[in-house]
Image (cartoon, grey):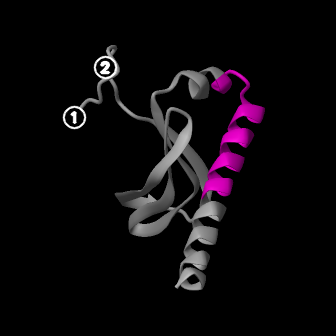
Amino acid sequence: MLAWLAPGRAAQADEIKEANDAVALFKKNDPGLARFFGHAVGYAVFPTVGKGGLGIGGAYGSGILYVGGKPAGKTTLTQVTIGLQLPSAGRSLVTNLPVTKSGHRCG
């Protein structure tokens, strides 16, 4: 039974490593983001978001949700667009979670 669960844990560890690598790259490219990551209550990191289409297009990515700077779960990003969509290489994305000044989540 444990051997059956091991591949899932390895895949999860790989996803977390990819997200951590994306955060490190964001910080390297914009040192000012270190403050964001240090003070954010929560954020989601999508190491690769692919998009494209013609007429009707879309984007999709899977990522890791961080709370208090620690991985807390998985999340996905899905987008549908209308209009010319040129294929593009994968991109990384980070987004913060909406919170109030008191630290409570909005919505």
Q: Position of residue 19 (x, y in %)?
A: 62, 51
Q: Position of residue 31 (x, y in %)?
A: 73, 24
Residue 96: image quadrant is top left
Whether residues under marks 2 and 1 lie with C-beta atoms below 8 angstroms apart, the answer is no
Q: Which mark is residue 107?
A: 1
**Left of 102 or right of it: where is 43?**
right
Query: Can the viewer see residue 105 in this picture?
Result: yes
Q: Is residue 32 above or below residue 72?
A: above
Q: Earlier in the sequence, mark 2 or mark 1?
A: 2
**Magenta residues: mostly which secondary structure?**
helix
> Dividing the image into 4 quarters, which one contains the C terminus?
top left
Q: Position of residue 95 (x, y in %)?
A: 48, 38
Q: Which mark is residue 72?
A: none
**Residue drawn at (40%, 34%) of the image:** 97
Q: Which residues are magenta?
A: 16-34
**Residue drawn at (46%, 62%) of the image:** 60
**Please, what is the three-letter code of the amino acid marked with disc 1?**
Gly
Query: Can the viewer see residue 89 in this picture?
Result: no
**Residue drawn at (67%, 47%) of the image:** 20
